[in-house]
Each structure stands twice: as structure tokens, then as C-alpha cells.
Image (spheres, grey):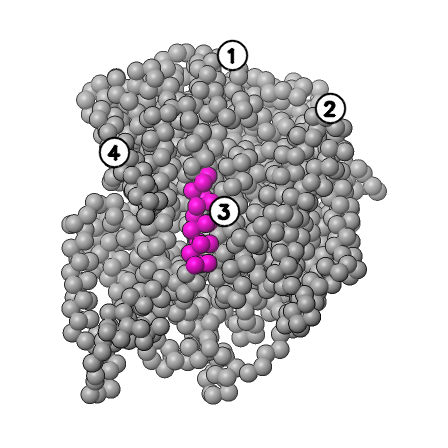
Amino acid sequence: MELFMQLFVTGVMLGSIFALVALGWVLIYKCSGVLNLAMGSLTMIGGYVCLGLYERFVTFMPVNSAFLVALVCTLIIGMILGLLTERIFLRKMIGEPILAVIMVTVGLSFFFKGMVFIIWDTDTQVFLPRIFSIDPIVIGGIAIGQVYLWSFIASLILMVAFVAFFKYTRWGLSMQACADDEMAALSLGVSAKFVYALAWGIAFMAAGVGGTLLGNINGLNYSVSLLGLLVLPVVVFGGLNSVPGAIVGGITIGILQNLAGGYLDRFFPGGIKEVAPFIFMVVFLLFKPYGLWGWERIERV
Amino acid sequence: MRISRSLLLVAAGILLCSMAFAAEEIKVGSINDLTGATSDVGKDAALGVRECVTYINDTGGINGKKIKLLLYDYGYRVPEAITIYKRFRDYDKIAMLLQWGTGDTEALSPTVNKDKMVTISDSLSGHLCDPAKTPYNFIYSTDYSTNARAALTVWFEEVWKKSDKWKKARESGQKPKLVCSYMFASPYSSAPIKAIKDQAKLLGIEVGKDMDVPLTALDAKSQVLAAKDENATVMWHGNTTMSVATTIKDAYSLQLGVDHIINNWGFDQNLLKMTEKAGEGAIGAASCAFLGMDVPYMDKVMEYCKKVNPEVPIEKRDIRTVQGWLKVSMAAAALGIADKKGKLDGPAIKAALESFKDWYPFNTPNALGRPGTTITDKDHRPSPVSVLYTIKDGKIVFFHQINMKEKFPDKWESWLGW
Amino acid sequence: MSYLPCGTYFESYAKDQKWWRTPFIKGKMILLVILIIAFPFLVDPQWLSIVYTINYYILAALGVQLLIGYCGQITLGHAAFVAVGAYTSAYMVLFVPWPQSFVDAGVAYPLSMICAGILAGLWSVLFGLPSARVKGFYLIMTTMAAQWITVPLIITQYVSQIGGRGQSFSLPTGTIQIGPWAIESDLEIYYFSMVLVALCLLAMGNMLRSKLGRAWVAIRDNDIAAETMGVNIVVYKLLAFFVAGFFAGIAGSFYISTLFFVSPEHYEWFYSLLWVGIILIGGVGSIQGLVFGSAFVVLVFKALELMVLGVSDIVMVSYPSLGWVTTKIIFFKESAFGLAIIFFLIYEPNGLAYRYWQLKNYFNLWPFSYTGK
């Protein structure tokens, strides 16, 4: 039982980071229909930007405030980068077949990767001085790393912030309108270009925070971008169009991965932990292709 | 129009420059990973290779001839490594190839052996040391299997038998238990596993179930928990620094209580930074001395770090740079011997490498912290000596050096090739 | 589509459906064949390996073009099927106890190639089954899952353990033999690849001219309408997956002969994406597009390589203290590759085949070139 609880709790913590990144992904898809395969690179950029800022600020500020300020600045820079990316690369692809746009995002991921390497090099970089202590917090026999706990809290705060943004602000409402029915929204004066740009900006922000949290767990380097692929089982499970689906999906996949790793690893010569989400995705697609909360497509001839 | 004309001029300039310096040069091709999955250590190694070549060219080259280094990045996309090798072989006509990872080394092994092109690789797998199977593959420092065996033996002798931590266990007659944590699916990680388990049997150490940890693992708690039931005493880490750090930190937070022995690609300053006090007492193998330690030629390494790549801060450079120097100094020495005899083709360079007897880089004993290298045509393992370091009080310090051939003279021969 | 030159007419349906309809095209094709045969003797040996890499990409992308361009099923996991083909072929050549007569006659490898194709086709159908229920993005997900389940899980952990030594092993020289010819050197691989490409493109083209092809195009354009007209879309979709997998298997089987080596690392996610990129760059829905796209991608890699090595050369010779430039240029290579793909897709959304078609029509329709779009 203790094993199960430990795995469960770790899964929830890690899954919250997946959920954050998936949230950004769902946003882009919901508003502009683009399957973004560059999510991993966005995560990496966010992490590196925060690291760079943190190293600057920590010279004249105490550790915790330096980190918070760096995080806020990362959000702002992420938004700007998102707006720029949409303007330069994706504005011209509006109306093109979807596969071409997917390939453009693939090209973008290479571009970002190269840029990150040029600016920050490829060495594994660590947040020094350490922000979260290495000693775990033990609650009822379950060890929770401090960094995981704070990641979970940060993800929750951000998710609540995003959901509130969508429900209660004008910009959020216009994004929802555009995602629901673009023509109708356009006829009511919502600017589609603005909505797309905003979607990318928010995705950058969400991925950026996700990257920062991941970087705190184990250092930042190229492998952080590999997380981007895990976003896909998450959104399949939750539904491609659904923001709450992304959140629930992220946490579920995190739990699933950990439980599969803990209980099933011994039966497979190479471990099942990494592939479990994808196998789950395939099985899930056969039975409930639109996810838990996705919108079902009704086609008319 | 203006733009394209100036582009044409630049292109012509490039061509002219590359042609102008074609005389009296020895071309060496180097395939490295600077942008791919192993780029965190690969970039440092590539910089080290270039710096060492610059140093050798500055100090007389190879019998007066300069080395022309063709360094390319294949991003751990193995088919690109193959394409670039074909270009090196057919167009540039390199004398020798320097390779990087297990992926490209093993993939190119049949082709390289068919073409009789000598290659020295950073993949120190024991499988590449048997000249009967891969006559043209060489490595520049003690292979993974020997290092693994050595690490386990040294742990057994120095820590298990002597430390207070295990005193109660020893006195109660408990046998130590080894658990291997590595990525099952990676040829690099899994290379020494059979050897280390054999060594455990030899020393009377029990072996528990293996733990699969992917090279890019963010979280290894599930694996650690599964291993907790095994009551292990020592854990071997076969992965690179990122995942080793994750596993050590998770083992610490779950209070697994094992000692850690780590392979050479998982043990460096980054490990120290990432694990802090969780890594205290970990023992790791290393190919040579760490950057900044007081050994002959380390000053030259530091000097050229600043000279060739001044924009990379010296604190970010590490042992991988020194490993790059090891590789190139070995290549240069072999090229020098072959060149003196007048032939610079594959078999001649191979014979030159196989004539190394107690060789040190730049012919200076203990240069770069490397024990003497002896290669024969029956055995491509450079050395039976493993140098082990440990993390003590937050610093990497020298721990122990062991000569596996002297310790197990009757077994050494049979350990070739796996 | 492309127009024939002004003034061409046919008097029978058979003549209209011929491959090479006008004497000009016949002459052009014969010249091409002569060029292909004479090519190795005209250029540097390194170009041979570039050309057979292009051929390998053509073979691999053939299946993708079929699925995406002609049948409208988006697939992002093709590397998995190529891997299945490669491993099947390698294992059959190495581990099946062929009777000596087979080995002497050099029949082992061609047989293994066909078996590889069939097995890869069946595997492809397995992952194509969801296409009966889902379309669009969800199909992309399932085919992507094909990639992630096949290569890292099944091949790396199970299949490659057969025969020991871990997940990669080499084929000793002499095992790849077709009839009396052993495929060893670059030259032989080049000719072998050319023959394979010709056969496969011919087979594909013929399939597309037939009832199969028409059914696939109907499904691509509007599958619900096609179903109402009596096309059994599930059967034809699965058939498309099978044929695509078959070609993938042949591509994989060919690839092992270029390298004498199999390893799961050669069939990564990156290659699935690359082949889809080749289709898009070359032009979706056209066979010439395949050739152009593959050539473009391989030449882009080559150009980047020349740039990196050339610049590194100049820097190290003239300005040794600028060593950092060599590292940055290597990082820039990654970005440049991404940018090349992005800008090509932004500015040439219809691909290279469209430009080629425009060029051909200019000449074919002259002096009425303005009538062709």
C-alpha cells in the first residue's frame, strides 16, 4: 500500500507539470487548429530563459525572491516570444493544409533548439544556488521531494489563473469564441490574428514555467525538450479541445506512468515506464477517440 | 544581384582557402555529437579535440606536417554519421577517424573494418576491444567492463571490508548485494553489465534485479522503490550524469541507503552540482584526471581552453575536455610513428597503435592522469588499470587506483571482448 | 496535372494510357536511363552514396506519399514499418537455415526482402486499423504511437535481443547476395538502389492508374461521398496501409545492404518526420514530387555540411583563436535546417513538383503557355 501511495503521489506531482505544458498545447489547437510539435522546444526555452535571469538576479537578491522575479520575467518574455513566433512564422500559414503547418512547427523545433544552443551552450546547467532543498518532506511515510511539491503548487496556481483568464476576462472570452466558431467570432469583431497570437503567447508562458520546474528537478539540458512528446497522450486522453481535459489528462498520465513503472517494469526486459503512456493512448483511441471531454466531429457530405 | 554576387565571392573564397592549404597535411576526420542526445558531454569533448589538435600543430605537428581536423556534428542521428564518413573517406581522404558514441561507432564498425580505416572512439565498450572481431576499432582509455569490475572490486575491498557503515552487516555475516541501474535498451549502458555481474560472482557478492532507468529520466522513484525490497548494499550506475543524478537523489530521498559506484560518463562536476549531499561518498571511474588537477600537461590543457575557446568560461569545462586531449594525443602519436615509416594508410596506423607499450600522452609519464597504455594486436584494451575517484566533502578527490591484471592474472585474458 | 504538347492526339485508348506517350518523352527517358547507368563513371565516388541515400528516402517516402498524398490518411510513424522490414530481412538472412543451394543461388536476400515487405505491410495494417474509426488528428496520433511502440519497445527490447549482443549487430560481408551478384561496394549498392527505385515507382504508378488508385483518390477527396458511391472505404484504407507498409519493408530491407548493420537508432521519430517533410517539400500527391523532395532534403544536408566544414576550415586556418565560431556554426546548422523547412513550406506550399509542372507546361503549351496555371 505504501508503494502505491508513494507512486501515486509522485505521479500527481509530475503529472501537474505535464498538465501545464499540455494546457499550452490545447490552447494553440483550440484556437487555431494547429498541432504543435514544437512544445518540447518551448519548454526548453522557458527553462533556459529563467535560468539566465535567475543567475543575473541572484547576485543582488536573496534566493527566493530572485527566483520569483525571474519566473515573472520568464512569463513576460515567453509572451513576447510567442507573439513574435506567431507573427513571423505562422501568420503566413493560415489557410494552408494542416500537415504543412505541423511540419512548420517541426521546423520551428529545430530552429529553437539551434538558437538555444547558440545562446546557452549544451552543458547541463543547474540552478545555483539551489532553490529547493534536496531533503524530502515526509508525510505519513511518503517522501515528497520539495521541488515536486512546489512544482505541483505552482502548476495549480497557474492552471487556476489560466482558467480564470478564460472565463472572466475579455481576451479569454474572445479566445473561447474564436475556438468555438471562428466565422461567427470574426463577424462579431474578434480579431482572429490577435487570438492566435495570444494562444501562442500563453503556450510559451505555460511551457516556460513547465520547463523551469523541470529544470529545477534535475538540471536543464537538451533532454528537457523530449517531454514535449508526452503532451500527446495527455491531450488524447483529455480531449484535444478541452482545457480541463488537459489538466486531468496530465495528472492521470503522470500517475499511470509511475504506477506502470513501479508494478510492471519487472515484466518487461526494457521497462515499460516510458512507453506506457503511448500504449495507453493507442488503446484509448480505439475506444474513445475523442477523449474524455473532446468535441466530437460531425461531418457532413 | 549584388547580394548574390558577393555570396559567390564568399563561396569562391571558401573554396580557394580550403584548396590553398592542402599541401603537407594529415587529414583527420572527427564525428561528434554537439546537438543531439549526448550533447551535454559531447560538446566539451569536441572542444577538447579541437584544442589538442591546435596544440599539436603549434608544437611542430606530426613530424613537421600539420593536422587538418575535419570536425562535424551528427546530432546522434546515426545515418548522418554514415554519410559524413563516406564524404571523409572518398572526398577528403582522411588518414584516420575519431568517433564519438556507441551508436555511430557500432554502426560504422563493419564499414570501417572493411575500408581498413583506423578509428578511435569515445565509446569505451569492451566489445570493441577484440581485434579478432573489430581489428580497426581502438579506444583511448580503460574500457567500460574493466572499469565496472574495478569499481566493484575497489568498493568491496575498501568500503565493504573497512568502513564503519557496513560493520554491523559484516559482523552478522550478511553478504553484500549488487543492483545495477542502467538503461536496458542502450548498448552503451548495458555494455559492462554482464562483466560486472561476473565480477560480483567472483567476489562473492549477491546480485539483485536490474533497474531500468532511461537516459533522460526525470524521476526514478518507482524504480528505486522496486529495488528497495532487494536490500541492496551497492548500486552500479551505467547511465550518463543526468539520470545518475536523478537516481541518486531519489535513492537519497527514499532512504535506500546504498553505496553508489558510477561509470565514467556519469561522474563529473555536474553530478556534484546536481546531487550535492546526496552524492557524498559516491565512487566513480574516470578516464583521466579532472580538469584543473595537478598532473603533467594539465596546464597546457587549461591554456588552450582559454586560447581556442575563450568565450566558454573555464568553470564550465570538465573532464571531457581532457578526454578529448587523450584521444587526439593517442591519434597523433600513432600518426607520427606511421608517418616516420613513410606509410599513412590504415594497416600502417593500426600497426603503429598496436606497438604502444606503456605509452603515455606526449611521452610524459602520468600525463593528464592517465596510466600507461599498452595495445597489442591480440588485445585492444589500452590498460588494465582503473583510476577511481570519489566525492568527499563536496569535492571530487582521487580515491584508488587498481590494476585488474595484477589482481586477477588468470582471468584477465578471458575478459577480452565482453 | 501536366499537359501534353500542343497537337498531340491519340487514336486508341491503349495509346492514351501508355506510360511514354510522345516520342519526346521516350527520348527523354532513354537519355535518363543512359545517364543513370553512366553516372558512377562521371563523378566523384562520394556522390554515389549521396544518390543511394536519396533512393533510400524515395523508397521510404513512397509509402508515406501513398498514404498521405493519394489516400488522404496522415501517417507520422512510417519509420516503424521500415524498421520492421529491416529487422525481418536481417534476421532472415542471418538466422534462417537456408539450404546450401539457396545460398549459392543468391536467393536468400531477395526472398527476405519480399518477406520483409509482407511482414511490414501486415504490421502497418495493424496500426492502420484505427483508420476505420478515426480520421485526421486522431489518426496522426495512432500512427505516431506505431512509431513509439514499435521501435523503442518491441524492436529495441525484444526483437534485437534475438541472437544476443544487444540491439545492434552487423551482417558479415557476403551475406547480401542477389543471384550471382554480391552487393558489397558503393557501386553495386548504387545500381541495386536504382533498379529497386525504378521497379517500385513503376509498381506504384501502375497501381495508381488502376481501380485501386481511383478508389484511393476518391477516399482522399471525400470519403463519405466515396462510400455512398460504393467504394468500401475500410477495405481500401487498410489496403493502402498494407501497400505502404510493403514499400516500407522493401526500403528497410534495402537499407541494411547499404550499411551491413541494423540498429533501432536508424529508425527514429526524426525519420518519420523527415519523410513526411519530403512529401510536403516535393509536392503532395505526385510521384515526381518524391524524387524532388528526397533530392532536396539530402542536398540541403550536404549544403549544410559544406558550410560547416568550409567555415570551420577558414576559421581554424586564419583565425585560430576564433574556435568558438566553429561550435556556433554547428549549432547554427540545426537552426538552418529548421529554417530551410519552414521557409520552403511557407513560400512553396505546393511543393517542388508544382514548379516542375509549371516549367513543363510552359514548354508543352507554348505559345499558349499562359493557359496552363
Given the image, on which type of amino acid does mark 1 rest? Answer: Asp
Give the Cα distance between marks 3 and 1.
Answer: 41 Å
On the same chain: label 3 and label 2? Answer: no
Q: How far is mark 4 from mark 3, CA to CA?
A: 31 Å
Q: Which residue is mark 2?
A: B168
Q: Residue at x 60, y 69 (%)?
A: A286
**Quadrant into which the C terminus of chain B falls:** top left
Name the image quarter holding residue C348.
bottom left
Q: Quick check: marks 4 and 2 in contact, CB under 8 Å? A: no
**Residue A267 falls left or right of residue B320:** right
Q: Quadrant of residue B120?
A: top left
> Looking at the rendered structure, which numbered label has been put on residue B16?
4
Mark 4–mark 3 contact, CB under 8 Å? no
Contact, mark 3 vs mark 2 (Cβ under 8 Å): no
Residue underneath mark 1: B294
Query: Going 52% across and 49% down the picture, which residue do you hit?
Result: A109
Q: Toward the viewer: B350 or A24?
A: A24
- CA separation in Å, label 4 and label 1: 44 Å
Amino acid type of the residue that numbered disc 3 sits on in the rendered structure = Phe
* Labels 4 and 1: the sequence-earlier one: 4
Return the residue at label 3. Answer: A111
Q: Residues within 10 Å of mark 2 (few under 14, many from 20)?
A: few
